Image: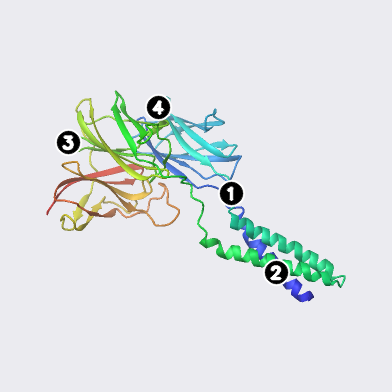
Amino acid sequence: MGKGIAAALVLVLLLVGSPAQADGAPVGQDTAVAQTLGGRELTVTLRRTDGAPAPLQVDVITHVGSPPGTLRLAATPAGESPTSTATIDLRTGPTTAYLRVDRYGPWELELSDGTTSARIPFAVAERVSPAWERTVYGGFVAAGLFLLLSLLLATRSSKLALIPAAALVAALATATTAALLSSTIPPKSTQDKPRPPVNLAVEATATGLVLTLTDSATGRPVDDLQVHHGALIHLAIVSARGTLAHVHPVRTAPGDYRVQFTPTDPGQHTMAAEFTRLGGGQQQVRARVDIAGEQRQPPTPAKGSVTTTPLRAGDPATLTVDFTGPDDLQPWLGMRGHLILTDDTQAVWAHVHAMATTAAAQPDETVAAYPAEVGFTFTFPHPGRYRAWFQAERGYEILTIPATFDVAP
């Protein structure tokens, strides 16, 4: 019986030792958010924190064309005053700042360049053990206690040792069953209930655009947008001449988003805003707005060429863009490339992605190792003329190649 008890002890130690390592797993994950702050196109990455209190690393990538300056960052618990601040000098490429979080729950990262401010919501999540995990740990701990009691009674040659021995077997069986069934138990959903669609109102100001998001059912400000493909809102703006601006409005208050935008030609602009609401899925909302200004020279297209398979309505087509040069493209907004499409009637708006990787951990923009040739697949819904803009990143510069396609019936 002594050898059997010793073997059981070794089994318990092995079983207890393995799950204990999972208890130290990092809490949360990295969150990258694109921000068009003032005249700067930034990518702000909040690195995951291991609980609280803990340091919060914030990486800010400044893209080519952004003016120099300083950026003030502040970590603020929701509804309170900042607990830590930092200031960084903006330059092309990545810059790192360190803040500190001292509690769990909702927070905001405040960004300010002295003129324009943004507030990025994030959460410091406390690790909550699921019921099956608590059952596994509890079963193993109970098994260990029953084993010690059995050893103590066995040394006294007491038949009572059979009682804790039986309890030991039951505890091990319970813990093992919970561990084996853990993969079949779905995690608790964070989406407490479905959300109705969002209404969008756009106003042009002297310096840009103001986007007001309201709940279509209650009319209240919408403040539950989730980071989707590296941004809270992806806003594509197209002028009458066919110039594209792909920007990412900053959140200034619940339901209030703003972006500095200088048109290349005044007049009516059409736009499509893409975002994801907690429990509401992805949504695209379109708008038209008249923007005043002076005629300006449109941005110079990037060097490259576009080739396609035959374009017929209803048939999947492959559109390939070659940005020329070495294979050193960087992922932008988590993707290797972007394709924005619209037809002359504005009935079709599409935003197509070329994935950077299918891995769970997406690379950030410091990785420069992707082919210069990027392929997209798209099915044109009806014949006619389409405008397209292919986008990628190289050397922290957003490259855009426009193209026009005639799609046959």
Q: Earlier in the sequence, mark 2 or mark 1?
A: 1
Measured as percent of width and height from the top left, residue 366 is found at: 42, 47
Residue that numbered label 2 is attached to: 169
Q: Earlier in the sequence, mark 2 or mark 4?
A: 4
Mark 3 Cα shell of 10 Å, populated few (<14), some (14-19), many (≥20)? few
Left or right of 394? Residue 158 is: right
Q: Look at label 2 and name its amino acid.
A: Val
Residue 146 screen position, x and y as percent: 76, 64
The label nearer to you, 3 versus 2, is 2
Q: Could you tell me how many numbered marks the image carries? A: 4
* Quarter holding residue 32: top left
Q: Nearer the viewer, mark 2 or mark 4?
A: 2
Residue at image mark 4:
116
Image coloring type: rainbow
Dots 1, 3 in contact, CB < 8 A: no
Q: Report the disc number at residue 241.
A: 3
Crowd around label 2: few <14 · some 14–19 · many ≥20 (10 Å):
some
Disc 1 target residue? 128
**In terms of sequence position, does the residue under pointer 3 or pointer 2 come before the other?**
2
Q: Amino acid at mark 4?
A: Thr
The residue mark sitting in front, 2 or 1, is 2
